[in-house]
Image (cartoon, grey):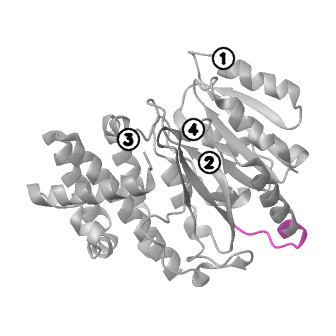
Amino acid sequence: MKLLSVAIPCYNSAAYMAKAIESALVLGDDVEIIVVDDGSQKDDTLQTGKKYERQYPGIVKCIHQENGGHGQAVNTGLANATGLYYKVLDSDDWFDSDVLIKVADRLKKLVAEDNMVDMFITNYVYDKPSENKATSIRYTNVMPQDRVFTWSDTKKFGPHQNILMHSVIYRTQLLRNSGLILPKHTFYVDNLFVYLPLPYVKTMYYMDVDLYRYYIGREDQSVNEKIMISRIDQQLRVNRIMIDCDVMAVADIKCRRYMLKYLTMLCAVSSVLCIKSGTEENLAKKDQLWQYFKDTNFEAYKEVNKTVMGWGSQFTSAPGKKLVLAVYYFAQKLLAFN
């Protein structure tokens, strides 16, 4: 059995996917790199994946599927994973290979000690070459370092310190036990990938290292603001699925608090995108989202509505909407997240 399965969803990614694949190859036989070609038609994505499969038998496997979107590619990777742990690496991002070796060594030690944690966390870096800017998101003030811990050991997460797909390595069996299946033909499911399994997480481990390099800058990137607005219905779909999760039933209080914080953040992002679009149709969708939240999960809505981010995102007046956008622009400039 492999130590780590790394799934790399690819869609017309031939121009840059090699960097992602090669950044994980340093682990040799400890890693299983699952390249999922999601029905690419415009370039040699499949041929590139098959080339690496031939060059690295037993390490790289390339799977072709009909186009199902990023979520379906993650599902396919998980279904074919044989590693004890599962990590998703987007095809335009990469690992710091030296750091990956250190992370793998720590995972191996935990496995050897029969102390497999449910979730392994590292830092990630917003890498924005166009502005010569690299911003590391760290959790040193939130989580104990270099030891196994539980939710009760965590401290308050800052507004920018969300646990994202970039920072998390899940135990493969935990993901399967959680019943995680991401929706097809939907962007922004990385939020669901992290959020939905959280109630199953009991033990964690954090290393203060910058493993994941999250590239920001391609015009066709899903987190490009204009593209996010054009796909607002998919963002809202993900948001509703998170609302449908019965967060108030989560037994661990600190886990529940974190999930509420994350849900608040995503509702705020959806609201900002609707406001920035400037259309009456999308402003109505923002109001419908919050009404859906109120009608579907009222206890969670009350908790979210207690926060500045929560009630502020529901402003309908022109000054209120300007205030929401001002906060968004400040965070955008500070972190360079899109």
Instruction: Indicate whether 317 appears above or below 285.
Output: below
Helix, strand or loop at label 2? It is: strand
Q: Are marks 3 and 2 in contact (CB under 8 Å)?
A: no
The magenta span reads 110-119
Observer-nearest of 278 and 174: 278
CA distance separating discs 4 and 1: 20 Å
For marks 2 and 4, the one nearer the N-term is: 4
Instruction: Indicate whether 109 appears above or below 14.
Output: below
- Looking at the picture, how far across and down is residue 251, in whole percent? 52, 79
Observer-nearest of 199 and 332: 332
Helix, strand or loop at label 1? It is: loop
Q: Is residue 49 magenta?
A: no
Which label belongs to residue 72? 4
Q: Is residue 193 visible?
A: yes
Q: Disc 2 marks which residue? A: 213
Q: Disc 3 marks which residue? A: 234
Of the two numbered discs 3 and 2 in the rendering, the one whose residue sits closer to the viewer? 2
Question: At 56% from the left edge and 76% from the top edge, which residue is drawn?
Answer: 142
